Image: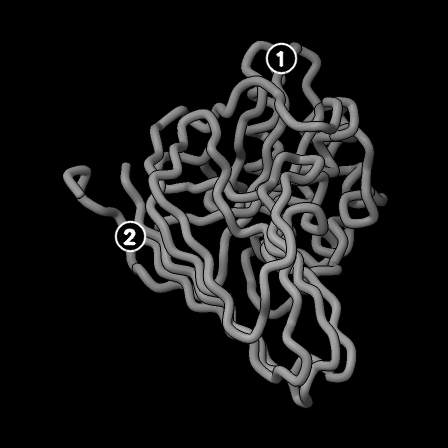
Amino acid sequence: MRLSIRHTTHYRFAEPVAHGLQRLRLTPKATHGQEILSWSMTYDGANLELEYDDQNWNHTTLISVLPGTQEVVIHCEGMVETQDKAGVIGWHAGHLPLWAFLSQTERTKPGAKMRSLVTQVRRQDGDTLAMLHGLSDAIRDTVRYETGVTHVYTTAEEALAEGMGVCQDHAHIFIGAARALDIPARYVSGYLMMDDRVHQEATHAWAEAHVEGLGWVGFDVSNGISPDPRYVRVATGRDYGEAAPVTGISFGAAEEELHVALAVEQQSMEQ
């Protein structure tokens, strides 16, 4: 499937910025089942400082906000070709060893609610893949998808206790529970082509777990499926913090407004 993506992030500050840095993880990965045909990024109100691949092999761009700026616009556009791999990414790559994805973070650390969930889904027959699908189903049944209830700092335990959250929360609960089951797991941020619309208000997030004999396998808890050709992987990490599309700091002004415009649509393979 050939997907066209247009993604614009618009920051508006209350006062002119004296100094600011933004870390961008907005370039899709060239990975198993995914080919980047074209990708470009432009910046208004900022300068490119550095590009590098981080510890998770996320292509990372560092930009500096121009002094005195009150608006920054980051525009990404490109074409990605995807294949149906039934959610299987395969072998582990990156600078971090596989065991690093067994350690919990502040966002994924289990509490009493998550430990109870782990007990419910644990299997003794050795079928890891079936156990992970069961875990995904259990989270989806327990945590209703609801926007505006949680935020980027909400922990997995808090979202599970609340019984509501978004894709980020579903992914964090899955990751924390999988690690509690001694299964390496990681967070994925990216794009999803929706069946009923082109324009969207946010990027998507899901989880991957490392299964013996298969490698990394994706689980989109929010939609109850493993990723298919409609999904584009952009960044991975131990939790949202390592895979966030945009992070940064600014001095001299408080952030007043953030607006995201995103369009993902299928293109003809002849283009």
How many labels, in total?
2
| Cα gap from disc 2 to disc 1, whole angstroms | 34 Å
- The image's colouring method is one colour
Measured as percent of width and height from the top left, residue 41 is found at 46, 57
Please name the residue that numbered disc 2 is placed on: 265
Residue 234 numbered mark, or none: none
Query: Percent x, y for residue 271?
Result: 18, 43
On-image quarter of the N terminus: top left
Q: Is residue 127 left or right of residue 114?
A: left
Task: Decide: is 24 above or below 266.
Answer: below
**Front one among 137 and 200:** 200
Which residue corresponds to mark 1? 212
Kind of residue at badge 1: Glu
- Residue 264: quarter of image: bottom left
Residue type for callout 2 = Glu
Tell which of 165 and 64 is nearer to you. Answer: 64
Element type at mark 1: loop
Give percent across and percent down for residue 259: 51, 74
Category of crowding for the residue at label 1, using alpha-carbon neighbours closer than 10 angstroms: few (below 14), some (14–19), many (at least 20): few
- Corner quadrant of residue 100: top right
**Mark 2 Cα shell of 10 Å, populated few (<14), some (14-19), many (≥20):** some
